[in-house]
Image: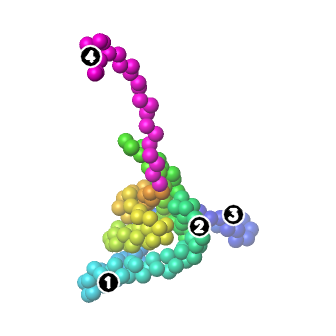
Amino acid sequence: MANQKTGAGRPSRRYVLSHRGQAKLGNDYLEIATDALKVLGEAAGEDAIRKFARDRFAAMEDRYAKALAGVEGLEARADVLSELLSTDGFVGYTRKVDTKVATALMHSVQLCQGHCPIQDLAREFPVFCDMETEMFARLIGVDVRRLSTLAGGGHVCTTHIPVGREKAPMRAEKRTRIQFTKQERPR
């Protein structure tokens, strides 16, 4: 609700619809885009939709690649990428995660996005999420894995980025003194 004074007397009130209200009234652009991609798929096949999705991220990737030039280290690159995503309205942030397995300590970063402008379209065409994940892998320079997406019903889009592995410290061995009797002593 926004108040704006219109002169003497009580201010007029103007109301803005919530996301649920917007959905109830309809989203013609989403419907038009979905229909257009369905027609594209029927006319030219799934590869045409894939190419469209790849081309959609190409300009973003070029822009991000310039900003990431000279940034060293996988964690630093993930942090800068999250800032770039936030600037574009994706509400990006990173979270460091360490996992201990039997013989190693795995270091990773989760690149999270709290908002996705094409979430509803990606729900119908998950190839958009696939192309975005591939873009992240190229920009960061390591194989990444998508753990969840908003389009798939997740709370946030989460991409796993492995950043290192260390050998786990071994527990000190308990030393036991072995005593031999005269009969057991090796010769």
Amino acid type, label 4: Glu
Q: Position of residue 167 (x, y in %)?
A: 44, 46
Which disc, if any, is residue 48? Answer: 1
Q: Nearer the viewer, mark 1 or mark 2?
A: 2
Q: CA distance from mark 1 to mark 2?
A: 34 Å
Q: Nearer the viewer, residue 114 or 47?
A: 47
**Distance in Å between CA atoms under marks 1 and 3:** 56 Å
Question: Which numbered disc flags the more N-terminal residue, 1 or 2?
Answer: 1
Q: Amino acid at mark 2?
A: Val
Circles 1 and 2, Cβ within 8 Å, touching? The answer is no
Above or below 85: residue 184: above
Label 2, secondary structure: give it.
Answer: loop
Q: Nearer the viewer, mark 1 or mark 4?
A: 4
Please identify the quadrant where the N terminus is shown.
bottom right
In this view of the protein, which residue sits in the foreground, 66 or 187? 187
Left or right of residue 29, residue 41 in this image: left
Q: Does residue 87 appear in the picture of this structure?
A: no
- In whole angstroms, how far apart are the C-alphas of marks 4 and 2? 65 Å
Q: Which residues are magenta?
A: 164-187
Along the polypeptide, which appears first: circle 1 or circle 3? 3
Question: On residue 166, which mark appears?
Answer: none
**Quadrant in the picture for residue 149:** bottom left
**Residue 159 on the magenta span:** no
Query: Which residue corresponds to mark 3?
Result: 10
In which quarter of the view is residue 67 placed? bottom right
Q: CA distance from mark 3 to mark 4?
A: 104 Å
Type of amino acid at the residue the image marks with label 3:
Arg
Q: How many marks?
A: 4
- Secondary structure type for disc 1: helix
Q: Amino acid at mark 1?
A: Ala
Of the numbered discs 3 and 2, the one sitting upstream in the chain is 3
User: Which dot, 4 or 2, sits closer to the camera?
Assistant: 4
